[in-house]
Amino acid sequence: MKLLTYPFLGLIRVWQVFIAPGLAPRCKYYPSCSHYTYTAIQKFNLLGLILGAWRILRCNPWSHGGVDYVPERIVLGTLKLDAKTLEKTAKINTFEGVR
């Protein structure tokens, strides 16, 4: 997990522990938007923020809601990213994978 993700994960945990319990449940999806975003950031680092933001935008009064888990991979045109690929790339870029 990248160092830049920790502040975002911390903000989400503050929301989950201190703010959300005082509000009535409003999320139309399962898992909740905060849990979805937290998992997406853990799985895809900062790209998970985009997934989380898109999920929050979809959670509106006109949405049908339902079960919506974090995808196993992200497909952007011809670019396919999954958690393992991102992890390998991070190791190569930080010279952890160099022997």
Image (cartoon, grey):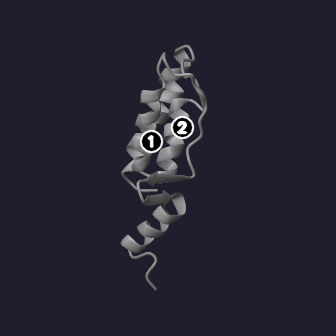
On screen, residue 58 versus residue 29, left or right, reads left
In this view, the mark in front (1 or 2)? 1
Q: Which of 4 and 86 lies nearest the eye of the viewer?
A: 86
User: How many neighbours does mark 2 have within 10 angstroms: few (below 14), some (14-19), or many (20 or more)?
Assistant: many
Going from N to C along the chain, the mark reached first, 1 or 2, is: 2
- State the separation of the CA atoms marked 1 and 2: 9 Å
Give coordinates of residue 27: x percent, y percent: 54, 22
- Residue 58 vs 98, above or below: the answer is above
Q: Which of 52 and 67 lies nearest the eye of the viewer?
A: 67
User: How many neighbours does mark 1 have within 10 angstroms: few (below 14), some (14-19), or many (20 or more)?
Assistant: some
Q: Residue at the location (57% across, 52% down)?
A: 72
**SS at badge 2:** helix
Give coordinates of residue 74: x percent, y percent: 48, 52
- Residue 67 vs 45, above or below: the answer is above
**SS at badge 1:** helix
Give coordinates of residue 60: x percent, y percent: 47, 20
Q: Residue at the location (41% across, 42% down)?
A: 49
Q: Which residue is farthest bottom?
A: 99
Per the rendering, the mark at residue 51 is 1
Q: Identify the amino acid type marked 2.
A: Tyr
Q: Residue at the location (57% across, 22% down)?
A: 64
Q: Tell whether label 2 touches label 1 (CB within 8 Å).
A: yes
Q: Identify the amino acid type marked 1.
A: Leu
Q: Which residue is farthest front?
A: 77
Which image quarter: residue 79? Answer: bottom left
Per the rendering, the mark at residue 36 is 2
Give coordinates of residue 99: x percent, y percent: 46, 86
Q: Residue at the location (49% across, 38% down)?
A: 37
Q: Which of 57 and 75 lies nearest the eye of the viewer?
A: 75
Per the rendering, the mark at residue 2 is none
